[in-house]
């Protein structure tokens, strides 16, 4: 059995956290390949090393003095090294990094050093091999992740090794410069390594015990989600449930490897298992609820719209030309509603309205702002009758006015639009009817 284990920044923020990580890794021989993030926050007002590196590099790039900022980064690592009592000095690495900052090696290079240095410290602490991600994770000329080349390099390099630490978040370009994934990208590295070594499981260790059935800022101590499918996860993540980087799903999903989200501070918790599909019955009809505020609806009305060829295309063309992406598009016989992100729409509002008038000659256009969307997601909804009915009666009981309904044809989710003022109440009503009453 082989597991790839990725540890997030908060799991490696201090020497104390490093000790927990070592206990977890040594508890099972299968935990052979380790992907660390850079040290994260030790307390809520703390700064992540990645952000310290960006800040420091920005000063260097402007030709300003960055000694103080650089020393603060050194202190973070030296603090961990000293407290763990390691026989390790990063002085040479710091000298090289400083010279590269002065030589303006780039923001990606700067940020990547957080994971690079943490990987060296962790490998030393565990007695594991250290492999620089720049030697095994590749991007192509356009900066896109090069999966074929990476897979080959990783398999060649890891074959025959009992263990290794491979820092997350970065790789190299064909011209040997360093490139990072987007923020939180160590999750992606972990997934890539898991696929390359044909791992049985990709464990993603963080500071929460997996996904929850509802946002804990709205519901006190919501029930955890023990098993979720990739598709359900995609729906919940789109609506803001952020535990895992979205792009981390693809490499392992393709290889049929499940992901287990685990809590470094509570390793005994089962966490959430993310799988392709499962025969396991979910505990409740719904798997989870997630939502977001900040949407605008543009309602367009025109008599006989249903008979007018190309009407929808002409409307969407206007949004496309103005670079505004639409999120949903529920429609009636003579009405069509386009839901967009408020922020993106606000800048282009008048251009879009004029465009629709010119292109489509509607009878009326009406705009409603401050809309919140709530996605109720669950693979069990397909086989349970009356789910939508229960949602709407719960909302009616709580005096929440439903402004929009969109049920995907997969029957995996129902999306409901409510006024932002009703957002919390709507979440509570739906949570109560399914989870509290165990429906
Ligand atoms: N350290 C990087 C960040 O803060 C990458 C990661 O943690 O996954 O975004």
Image (cartoon, helix red, strand yellow):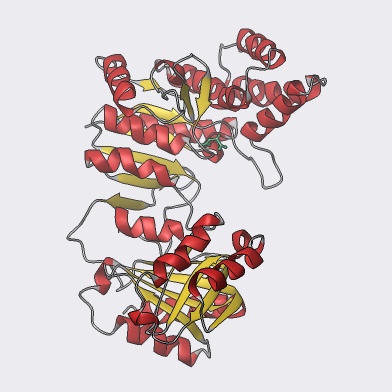
Q: Is residue 346 above or below residue 191?
A: below
Q: Is residue 149 left or right of residue 103?
A: left
Residue 290 visible from this viewpoint: no
Q: Is residue 89 above or below residue 412?
A: above
Q: Is residue 225 above or below residue 111?
A: below
Tell which of 138 and 72 is nearer to you.
138
Residue furthest right as drawn: 65
Q: How many marks?
A: 0
Q: Position of residue 189 (x, y in %)?
A: 41, 32
Residue furthest top as drawn: 92
- Ligand 1, seen in the image, is in the quarter at top right
Q: Residue at x 63, y 22 (%)?
A: 106
Q: Residue at x 40, y 86 (%)?
A: 392
Q: Is residue 4 left or right of residue 276?
A: right
Q: Position of residue 371 (x, y in %)?
A: 57, 74
Tell which of 282 and 233 is nearer to you.
233
Q: Residue at x 60, y 63 (%)?
A: 345
**Is the C terminus in the top left, top right, bottom left or bottom right quadrant?**
bottom left
**Is the N terminus in the top left, top right, bottom left or bottom right quadrant?**
top left
Residue furthest left as drawn: 279
Residue 198 visible from this viewpoint: yes
Q: Residue at x 69, y 12 (%)?
A: 103
Tell which of 261 and 406 is nearer to you.
406
Residue 141, picture quadrant: top left
Q: Position of residue 350 (x, y in %)?
A: 65, 67
Q: Position of residue 137 (x, y in %)?
A: 40, 23
């Amino acid at each position: 059995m082989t597991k790839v284990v990725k540890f997030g920044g908060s799991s490696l923020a201090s020497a104390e956290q490093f000790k927990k990580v070592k206990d977890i890794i040594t508890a099972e021989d299968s935990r052979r390949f380790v992907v660390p993030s850079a040290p994260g926050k030790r307390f809520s007002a703390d700064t992540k090393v990645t952000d310290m590196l960006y800040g420091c590099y920005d000063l260097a790039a402007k030709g300003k003095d960055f000694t103080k900022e650089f020393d603060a980064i050194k202190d973070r690592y030296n603090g961990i090294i000293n407290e763990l009592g390691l026989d390790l000095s990063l002085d040479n690495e710091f000298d090289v990094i400083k010279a590269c900052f002065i030589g303006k090696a780039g923001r990606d290079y700067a940020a990547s050093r957080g994971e690079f240095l943490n990987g060296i410290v962790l490998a030393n602490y565990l007695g594991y091999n250290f492999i620089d991600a720049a030697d095994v994770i590749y991007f192509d000329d356009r900066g896109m992740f090069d999966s074929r080349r990476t897979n080959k390099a990783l398999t060649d390099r890891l074959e025959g090794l009992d263990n290794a630490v491979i820092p997350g978040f970065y790789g190299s370009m064909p011209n040997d410069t360093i490139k990072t994934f987007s923020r939180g990208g160590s999750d992606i590295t972990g997934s890539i390594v898991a696929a390359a070594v044909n791992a049985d499981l990709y464990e993603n260790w963080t500071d929460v015990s997996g996904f929850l059935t509802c946002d804990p800022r709205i519901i006190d101590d919501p029930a955890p989600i023990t098993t979720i499918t990739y598709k359900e996860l995609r729906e919940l993540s789109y609506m803001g449930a952020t535990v895992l980087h979205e792009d981390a799903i693809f490499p392992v999903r393709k290889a049929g490897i499940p992901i287990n989200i685990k809590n470094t501070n509570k390793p005994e918790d089962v966490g959430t298992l993310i799988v392709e599909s499962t025969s396991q019955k979910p505990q409740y009809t719904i798997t989870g609820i997630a939502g977001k505020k900040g949407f605008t609806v543009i309602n367009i009305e025109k008599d006989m719209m249903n008979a007018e060829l190309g009407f929808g295309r002409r409307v969407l063309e206007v949004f496309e030309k103005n670079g505004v992406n639409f999120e949903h598009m529920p429609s009636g016989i003579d009405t069509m509603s386009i839901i967009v992100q408020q922020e993106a729409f606000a800048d282009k509002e008048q251009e879009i309205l004029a465009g629709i008038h010119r292109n489509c000659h509607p009878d009326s256009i009406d705009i409603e702002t401050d809309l919140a969307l709530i996605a109720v997601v669950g693979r069990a909804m397909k086989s349970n009758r009356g789910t939508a009915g229960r949602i709407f009666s719960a909302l009616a009981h709580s005096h929440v006015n439903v402004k929009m309904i969109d049920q995907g044809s997969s029957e995996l989710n129902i999306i409901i639009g409510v006024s932002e003022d009703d957002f919390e109440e709507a979440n509570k009503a739906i949570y109560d009817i399914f989870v509290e009453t165990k429906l």
